[in-house]
Each structure stands twice: as structure tokens, then as C-alpha cells.
Image (cartoon, helix red, strand yellow):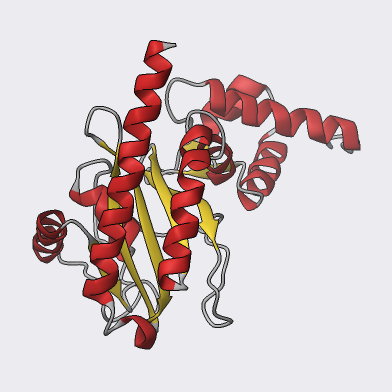
Amino acid sequence: MTTPPTTGTQAVDRAALLVATVVRADEPLTFADLQAACGLPKSTTSRMLTALERSELLERNDSGSYVAGPLFWLYATRHDPWEELVRLARPTMDRVGQDTGETVNLSVCRGDRVVQVAQVDSTYLLGTRDWTAVDVPAHSSALGKVLLGYGVVDLPKGELEQLTPYTITDREALRRELAQAVRRGWASTADELEIGLSGIAAPVRGSGGEVVAALGISGPSPRLQDRREEIGRKLSDRAEQLSGLLRRNTRKEGVA
């Protein structure tokens, strides 16, 4: 029997049903789970899920089951509970931009992802890019290394993605790198995410002393290679100032 053509409104309703079913589920759902729960034909379910993955409303995990997509994580990190963090961090990020001239980013952990929630653009023509919508593997970025080093996010299971010849994919070597970053108070990358791109980042702590975010800069490797130590120390100082601001802000809210 031929499935009748889907109207525009009906297509939206069905797509919304699939998304809502995944988001409300207590665990990832397989294709068969979704088809049964939504009562849709197999061909319709397949077509709709492909479109929803393409638009990043849904995605599949390592086992092939469906979970909420990157757009949900991006929206969540740009709103409560991180909205206040971003607001408080803006002046510090502006100062880091003035100190270094490079692109400045603030990252937080959302689930098993490191998401960049705020950015100050570089003052240089070479180096400006909007990173807030880019999904970057944590082990290949300085911001991610900070959150990995302090246990805010865990390394994914399986092989680590080799993005460039310089990406650290050996777990033991990466653990040594993370331990060094924790000892000195800042992490760095050089050509590990992309050839010619380097990054430096430092931890931002919340009211209880726990690491809640990473503050970092990125720019062309030739421009940063001789400034790594200097910028690392400056970032640590700025991140500590932001941490102090977060502690004071929390105490004020407590008094109120």
C-alpha cells in the first residue's frame, strides 16, 4: 500500500514528535524504538531522522541510538545556568583580548561535550573566526585540555581522533600532558587541532573552588610560539581574577 503524500504541516508535526520523543526519553532510543513509539512508517521515520540529524536537532551515539543533537547543547550552554557566567566573564575576556590581541573564548562542559559559550574576536585580521558553534574534540584544544585535566569532562572511549600529525592520541602521553597543565596552571596546544593554529587556556573556578570553565585564547602558531609562557601566566592571572569575581557574586546572592 502506498503511503499518502505528507503535507507541510504534517511533516513538521512528525519531525517534532520524533524530537520530543528522543528528548523526553530516559535513555537513547534505537530506530525501532522510535518507529514504534511514534507509530510512523519505516520509510517516513528514516527520512525524518536523516533530516533531523542533518539539521543537528538529533544525532546518533556510538551504539547508533538517537540522542538530542548539538543544537540542544549549544542552546543550553548559552542560557541558564551559564548566562550569568558569560555576563560576568565578558569584562575579563575583553581584558585578555587587549592583553594579547588574540581570539578569546570561554568554554564549559555540557554532558560529555566541551562547548564554547562566549568569544571576543582577535584584533588581527588573521585569526578571527567564530568558534562558538564549532564542535572541537576536547583532547585537541587547550580549553578542552583544561577541563580534561581537572576532571570536569572525561575522555571518550575508544581511539582518540587524529586531526593532525601533532594531535596527541596516545592516552598515557595525553595524561602526562594534562598533569603538566594542572601543575603549571595552564594548558596549550600547537597544531593539534589544525596545522598553523595554537591555543592556550587556564581554569576558572566556582564558589567552591571547583573548575567550572576554561578561559583561553587561540591564534596562528607562528605568532604564539614565542609568547606561550608569557600568555599562559597572564591567562592564569586573568582566570583567577574571574574566579574571585564568581566567588564574590555567589556570596552576594547568598546574603540576598
Q: Is residue 71 left or right of residue 85?
A: right
Q: Residue at x 41, y 68 (%)?
A: 99
Q: Quadrant location of the C terminus?
A: top left
Relative image position of residue 239 (x, y in whole percent):
31, 50
Relative image position of residue 98 (x, y in whole percent):
47, 67
Q: Residue at x 37, y 54 (%)?
A: 215
121 relative to 205, above or below: below
Asked if residue 167 can be seen in this view, the reply is: no
Q: Residue at x 33, y 54 (%)?
A: 238
Q: Quadrant location of the N terminus?
A: top right
150 relative to 196, above or below: above
- The picture quadrant where one finds residue 43 is top right
Relative image position of residue 146 (x, y in whole percent):
26, 53
49 relative to 221, above or below: above
Q: Residue at x 29, y 70 (%)?
A: 231
Depth check, front residue: 126 or 76? 126
Q: Is residue 192 left or right of residue 218?
A: left
Q: Is residue 249 left or right of residue 144?
A: right
Relative image position of residue 145 (x, y in whole percent):
26, 57
Q: Is residue 61 left or right of residue 203?
A: right
228 relative to 178, above or below: below
Specify the farthest residue to the bottom.
222
- The picture quadrant where one finds residue 79 is top right
Asked if residue 169 can be seen in this view, the reply is: yes
Depth check, front residue: 72 or 120? 120
